[in-house]
Image (tube, grey):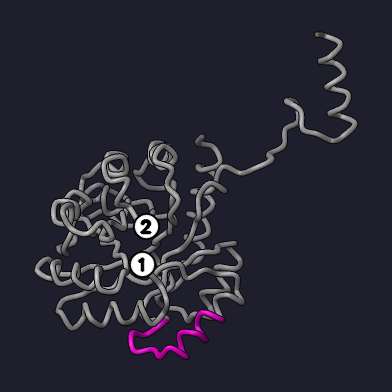
Amino acid sequence: MKNYTLLSLCLALLLGAPTASAQTLLRHGSDDFRIGVAGYSYRRFTIDQTLEYLHKADVKYMSIKDFHLPYDSTAEQMEDFKRKLAEAGVDGYILGPIYMRSEAEVDRAFEYVRRYGHTLFIGVPNYELLPYMEQKVKEYDIRVAIHNHGPDNLPFPDAADIMGRIGNMDARIGICLDLGHTVRYGGDCVKDILAYRDRIFDIHFKDVTGNTRAGSTCEMGRGIMDYIPILRALREIGYTGVCSLEFEKDENAPDPGIRESLGYFRAMADAVK
């Protein structure tokens, strides 16, 4: 047995195979996650500027906001936009958040998403519009991920509120879970991830300075959020959606904070198994 082990080690060294003593990383743990950036983070920048920033940060996924692609864009303009993203190596994987305060705005949202060719968007409907939105989900076969906004006096403060209202609705209506707003509302991200795993379609991540409404976005690692249990929970449920950094801070110069936050998230995902 000892001779066999020695032979195996010699062959491994000769063939260049990794050994237990080689301090090299064959695969990053962060490769388990599709890491993106929410388009809202670059709200003061053109799409060309945004794509340049994403290229430098090695980001392949972005959610698309209407200031980059207006709601009245034609199918031809949308194709041009998609071509621009493809040439930059970026997947505009989801549209929104799209706020819907009337039936006309619900109609506009679904037509916008259909015209783009997607089957999922982030939505924030008024509560009374949920039944009408569900009709559109069935009509268009388009999924909606409802975004929670914590204590900011908007509909759907947390995942429990979302599920309490959509739990008996079409399963194509789910959650865009904003982890920072969850903490600002005093919630438990891990509990929500585990409880609502089947209805979480998208995730916005960030760090925040406090667990009250006064808490605000900050560079990841500088705030109060512990991402070790969050990442373990995401691994436990086998989450395959995109994790998008939504960085509201420094709207006129967000890129340094975005880069720092992405680096922190990737390093944590590498370390947490």
Amino acid under disc 2: Asp
Q: Front-most of 150 and 223? A: 150
At horizontal 44% and vertical 72% (from top left) the residue drawn is: 42
Cα distance in 3D space between marks 1 and 2: 10 Å
At horizontal 26% and vertical 41% (from top left) the residue drawn is: 195
Q: Residues within 10 Å of mark 2 (few under 14, many from 20)?
A: many
- What residue is disc 1 on? 120
Residue 182 within the segment the image draws in magenta: no
Q: Front-most of 268 and 163? A: 163
Q: Residues within 10 Å of mark 1 (few under 14, many from 20)?
A: many
Left or right: 133 in relation to 197: left
**Nearer the N terminus, badge 1 or badge 2?**
1
Give the mark toward the camera: 1 or 2: 1
At horizontal 45% and vertical 50% (from top left) the residue drawn is: 240
Q: Is residue 187 above or below residue 173?
A: above
Percent position (x, y) of residue 159?
A: 22, 51
Q: Which residues are magenta?
A: 69-83
Q: Secondary structure at mark 1?
A: strand
Left or right: 149 in relation to 23: left
- What residue is disc 2 on? 202
